[in-house]
Amino acid sequence: MKSLRLLSLAPCALVFAAACSESTPDPIQPPPADAGTADAAIPDVPEPAMPCGDALAAIYGDPGPLASDPAQRGAVLKCSKDADISKEALQAKLTEVGYKGKPVTSGARVYRVSYRTERGDAASTPSVSSAIVYVPTTPAAAKLPTVIAARGSRGQGPDCAVSKLAAAADSVNSDFYRLAYPLVGAGFALIAPDLAGYANFGAAGNPPSVYAGAADVGRSTLDGGRALKKLFPSLDDKVVIVGHSQGGHSALASLALVDTYGTSGPIAGVAVYAPLWLSQRTWGAALLSGESGKPGREVGTSSIPAVVAWYHYTHAELLDGPGEGKKLFAAGKQDAVKDWVDTACWANYEKLKPLGKETLDLFDPAFAGAVRLAAAGVAQCPDSDAVCKKWIARYVEDRPHLTGAAAQVPILMLYGGKDTTITPDRMKCSLDRLQEDKTKLTVCYDPERDHSTILDERSGYVSEWIANITTGAPAPAACPGNESQITEPCATPPPND
């Protein structure tokens, strides 16, 4: 059997997050360090179409009955005004985290909202997502596009929600500033959805957000665009989706839903930094004994076991029913895994440490035995093994092909040659898949950047790219490299399907 080479997910990776001061006493309060005297209002600043006087706590509370109604996708249920951010405070934060783009030209008005969406289950269960919204005080154009910022891995518990700016997820907060602040600082309005499952967390019929579940995260993301457009009707119909790492998966999964789920307007472009557009078989293949327990991948210290646990637990909770997530794990460890999912954010893996050394130790042996070889592509599911067939189908469905209108949307992929989180041989798998689908792909390759610093160096480039494709502004200067410099072959197993 070929050795399975799995990507190593560093603590700063898979992130698209908002940050807060560690001294913030309430995780749903705005961070004092980022608040500043807002830029003077100008006539062109978009104004919300509804009062935004709801309490912050209401954004994350019980939304009340939600009848199934596709016409209500993206309907804003609650809106709360947050502290404005001055241009100077925004620039100061970017300087602090290492941003190297052009100086910002705008501050931001900030809101938090909850909006209608649907879950990615067979019933399209009505749900709610919370989100944070940034509106420029100095807009880049008279008609701004609707920009959706797809955040990356943060953990699946309530305090991990990007909109809360909580210290619990502080290890992954900087990349949010690196990506989102240059966009609003360049004069664009954007929404960063938490995704369904975070608001009203733990309520009956409201399972956690499904980690890398294409249908689940895709619907919440697209409905975030609808919500932003409903809140600010003066925005242009054009939609742009931007995502980093696991947020890149959310962005591309959303694009795949364009023909079937619809959007608030035409998708003008999708920009993804180091997208996790890998075969999602990766998480089942990680259950091969000995692989995940290699140095740097141990339970309690590495993100690999955490992602594998999040992926399987959250899929089972939504698609198989309440309580089914923990049943995938070893007897005597199930309640501890559930507690960790409910309470821990990215890089907080201490609660997993007592449960074993490697990923396989966490899981029920029967479940791991059913899926791991087929996930790696070194065996087929037996005809009689319904568990194996179910999970292989889920892995494959979580990286849908981009067809129809989706294949015609411009995609900008940005990648750093020193990325050790999604290594070049793994990123080549993503590149091969996008090329296989004959997408309108442009690659911006920077040989000196890694998984996070690609944001420092290229988020300004993305702002210029968005301005070019949506407002006709000049195109950005050429990147230092392109896809021809990602030369390593796609690493398998698992198969790149």
Image (cartoon, rainbow, N blue to C red):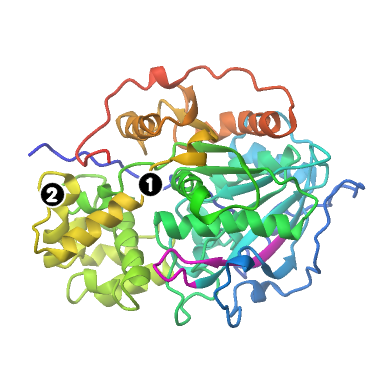
Identified by mark 1, the residue type is: Pro
Front residue of 251/273: it is 251
Q: Is mark 2 on a helix, strand or loop?
A: loop
Identified by mark 2, the residue type is: Gly
Q: In which quarter of the image is the N terminus?
A: top left
Write the residue at 23% across / 66% down: 354
Taking the image as shown, residue 3 lies to the left or right of residue 205, namely left
Residue 406 location, x and y as percent?
50, 40
Foreground tag (1 vs 2): 1
Write the residue at 67% across / 22% down: 475
Which image quadrant for residue 370? bottom left
Q: In this view, does 391 lie above or below 3?
A: below
Q: Does the magenta stretch include residue 284?
A: no
Does residue 20 appear anywhere in the picture? no
Q: Name the residue under label 2.
A: 290
Q: Is residue 478 above or below residue 81?
A: above
Write the residue at 56% across / 58% down: 162
Q: Does the magenta stretch include residue 116?
A: yes
Taking the image as shown, residue 84 lies to the left or right of residue 61, namely right
Taking the image as shown, residue 163 lies to the left or right of residue 44, namely left
Front residue of 48/400: it is 400
Which image quadrant for residue 342? bottom left
Magenta-highlighted residues = 111-125
Q: Name the residue under label 1.
A: 400
Q: Residues within 10 Å of mark 1 (few under 14, many from 20)?
A: many
Front residue of 147/264: it is 264
Residue 347 location, x and y as percent?
40, 55
Q: In this view, does 339 lie above or below 192?
A: below
